[in-house]
Amino acid sequence: MRKAVLMQTARWHILSCVIFYLLAILPLVYAQSITELKSRAEDDDVQAQLALAKAYHRGEGVPKDEAEAVRWWEKAAEHSDVAAQINLGVAYSLGAGVPKNFAAAMRWYTKAADQGNADAERGIALLYHMGQGVPKDDAEAARWYRKAADQGDPQAQSSLAGLYHFGQGVPQDDAEAVRWWKKAAEQGNLDAEGNLGTAYGLGVGVPKDEAESVRWHTKAADNGGAASQLSLGMFYMSGNGVPKDEAEGVKWLRKSAEQGNRDSQLALGESYLAGRGVVKDEREAFQWLVKSADQGNAQAQHDVGYCYLHGIGVALNETESVRWFQKAAEQGNTGSMYNLGQAYSLGTGVPKNIPDAIRWWRKAAELGIGHAQFNLGYIYHSGDGVPKDDVEAYFWVCVASTSSEQRIIELRDKLRDSLPPDKRSEVETRCRKWIDAHQKPAEQQYVSQGEEKWDALLRDAEAGSADAQVKVSLAYLVGDGRPKDANLAVQWMTKAAEQGNHDAQFNLANFYHHGNGVPQNDQTAVEWYKKAAEGGSVQAMGNLGNMYCAGAGVEKDCKRGIEWTRKAADKGDTVSMTNLGAYSMTGTCVEKDPADAFHWYGLAAGAGSHAGELVLAKLYMNGVGTQKDLNKALEFFTKAANAGVPEAQFYLALAYLNGQGTQRDYLSSYQWATITQWGGKARGDLLTILEGKMRPEELAQAKDRAAVWLKEHPAIQETNTGTVRVLN
C-alpha cells in the first residue's frame, strides 16, 4: 500500500524557487536615470550592474530583455557578487536569456555556495533532487538542504522536511519532518505551515491535535495558501476541529477557488448546487464546476455531465453530458462509467449501442457499483441486445445482492430457481470468489463484536457453531477487545476446520503454510488445502496447485498441480489464471508455450486481474505469444496503471514519451512518471529527459494532474507478476 501523502507536502517546482531568487535577492534600483546607471555599470560599479540587470529583467525604464539582464549579471558575477551568481544559476535553470543549461546553473550556484550563501545551497540541493545537471542523488540533496536549513533558510527547512516525510535520501522519519516544518513554519513559510497543519490533523509525526491543525492551516490560509484555504473551508463545512459554520467554510473555499485550486472550485460549485453556506444558485454552481472540470478534476467533469443531462444551471444538452461523462470515466470515475452505460442503453446523447452500454456497466460493476451490477444481470436475463444468458445474469445479480435491495433480491431468487443445481452451485462459488477478491482480507474486515456480542459469540463457539468458532479465531488473530493470541486463533480455527467448514480449513492451511501461531509445516498445510479444495474452496484449489508444482509439503507432481490450478482458473480465480500463464511462459511444469501464456493472461485480464493486464500489455508490446500490437499494449498498460500498478504506470510513461500506440504526449508521460514508484534510476532518467523537453508551465500542469490522480487513488495495489505468485 502506498504511504498516505500529506496535503501540501513539499513541492519540487523549479518555478517557485526561481521566483524567489530573481525577485527577492535583487537590490533596489537606483534613482538615477538609466543612462547614468549604464555609465556606472560600464565603469564596473557592481551595484549599478546589478540594478541594471534588474531593470532589464523587470522591464523597468527599459524594454524587458532577459539576455541583457544575464549579460549584466555575468559582469557582476565576475566580481564574485553572490546575488549575480545566484541569478545566473536561475537563468540557466529556466533558460531565461540563455539556453537552458543545468550544468551551468550548478556551476554558478556552486560559486555562490562556496561563499556560504544559503540560497545557493538550496539551489544545488534542488538540482540534485531533480537530477538536473548532475545525477539524481537525494542523499546529496539532503546534505545541501541541511546546510541551508542550518543557516535558518525556511524554504530549505521545509524541503528537508519533505525528504524526511518521503524517506528520500534520508531514513523516513515523520517526527524529524515535523521538527523541520516547525522551524520553517515559525518563520512564516507557507508550505511548512500547511504541512504542519496536515501533520497535526492526521497525527503524522506528532500526536493528532485538531486544534493545532486548524491553527496552522489558518496561518497558511491567511498567508494565501490555496491548499490550506481548502482544508480550512472543509473543516468549517464539516465542523471538524471548529464549530460547524458553512458560511465561513464557503468564504475560505471561495478564496482558494479564486486562486485556481480545482478541488476548491469543485467544493464551491457543489455548495452552490446544494445551497450549503450560500443561497442555492445553479448557474453559479455550474460556472465553478466547469472551471474545475476544465482543469481535469474527474468528479467535477462528472458533475458537469450531470448538469447538462438534467439542465441544471445550463440548457439541457444530452450530447454534452455524454462528452463530460466520457472525460470523467476515462479518469476512473465510477459514476460516469455507470451513466455512460445508461446513455448507450437508452440512446441518450449517443446512438443506442448495447455492447457499449455493457462495456461501461462492466467497468463500473468491476469497481463495485451495485446498480451497474444489477443492470448487467438484468440485460443478460432479458436478452435485450445480447444473447440471453441466465448464468451470467445470475452471477452479476448475485454480486449485486450484497446491497439487499428488494428488486435485486427478487431477481436473484428468480434466476437461482431457474438454473440447474450444478450451474447454480458453480455460479455461487464464482460469486463468492468475486466478492472475496474485491473485499479486504478477513482480518482487515473484522468488525468489533463488543463485549455483549462477544459473550454470545463465545457461547455459540463453545456450543459447537463452526461459524462462531471462525469469528472467535479471527478476533484473537486481530486482537479485538482482547490481546492478540495467534495460538488461540489456531485452536478455534482448528475446531471449525475439523467440523468441515471449508473457509476454516483454508485459513488453517494458511496458518501452517506461514507459520502463524503454529510451527511452519507445509505438509500439514497441504492436508488442509486438500480438504478445503475438495469442499469447493477456489482459493484452496489454486494454492494446492502451487504446492504440487513447487513440491512444497508434498512430492512434486506437475500433473496434479496443473489440474488443481486449472480447476481454480476455470472457476474464475484470476491468480490461478496468471499462474498458468507464468508456467507456460517459463516452462514450469508444462512445455514452454508463449501462445498459451498469452491465452491465460488474457483470461485473467478479462476477469479484472491487474497483474494479468500488466503482463498482457508486455506481451502485446513485444509480440510474444501474439502479434505485436502497440495500441493493445497501451490499452492494457492504461488499465493496469489506472488500477495502481506501479510498473504499468512506468511503461505507460515510456509509451507516451516515445509515441508507442499513441501520439507523443510529454504531459501524460511526465504525469505517469511522477505517479509511479517503479523504475529506480530509469524513472529518474525519464523525468530528467522530460524536464529538458517541457516548459515550466507544462511541468506544473503535469504535476498537478499527477497530484489529482494520487488524491483520487490513495491506495496503490502491489502486484507480483514476474513469477508464480506467492501462496495466499
Image: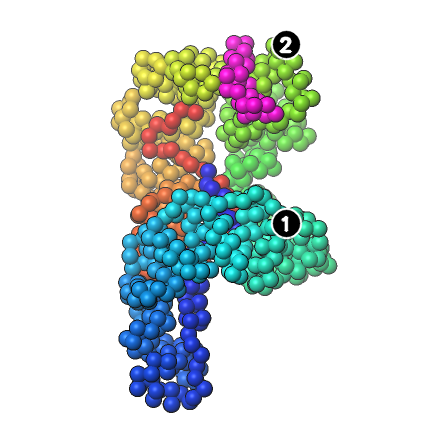
Residue 482: x and y, percent? 59, 23
Q: How is the image coloured?
A: rainbow
Q: Is residue 560 above or below residue 205?
A: above
Q: Residue at the spot x=61%, y=13% of the render?
A: 461
Magenta stretch: residue 477 in it?
yes
Q: Quadrant of residue 194?
A: bottom right
Q: Is residue 488 left or right of residue 520?
A: right
Q: Is residue 185 above or below residue 448?
A: below
Q: Residue at the spot x=39%, y=63% of the render?
A: 118
Q: Residues within 10 Å of mark 1 (few under 14, many from 20)?
A: some
Q: What residue range appears in magenta?
A: 473-499
Residue closest to the eye, 182 or 417: 182
Q: Residue at the spot x=42%, y=63% of the render?
A: 17
Q: Residue at the spot x=33%, y=73% of the render?
A: 81
Residue closest to the eye, 529 or 116: 116
- Under tag 1, what secondary structure? helix
Kind of residue at disc 1: Ala
Residue 138: x and y, percent? 35, 51
* Observer able to see residue 67: no
* Observer able to see residue 205: yes
Kind of residue at disc 2: Ala
Residue 240: x and y, percent? 65, 48
Q: Main secondary structure of the magenta part?
A: helix
Cα separation between marks 1 and 2: 50 Å
State the residue position of label 2. Answer: 463
First of labels 1, 2 by sequence position = 1
Q: Quadrant of residue 689?
A: bottom left
The residue positioned farthest toward the right in the image shown: 279
Nearer mark to the viewer, of 1 and 2: 1
State the residue position of label 1. Answer: 211
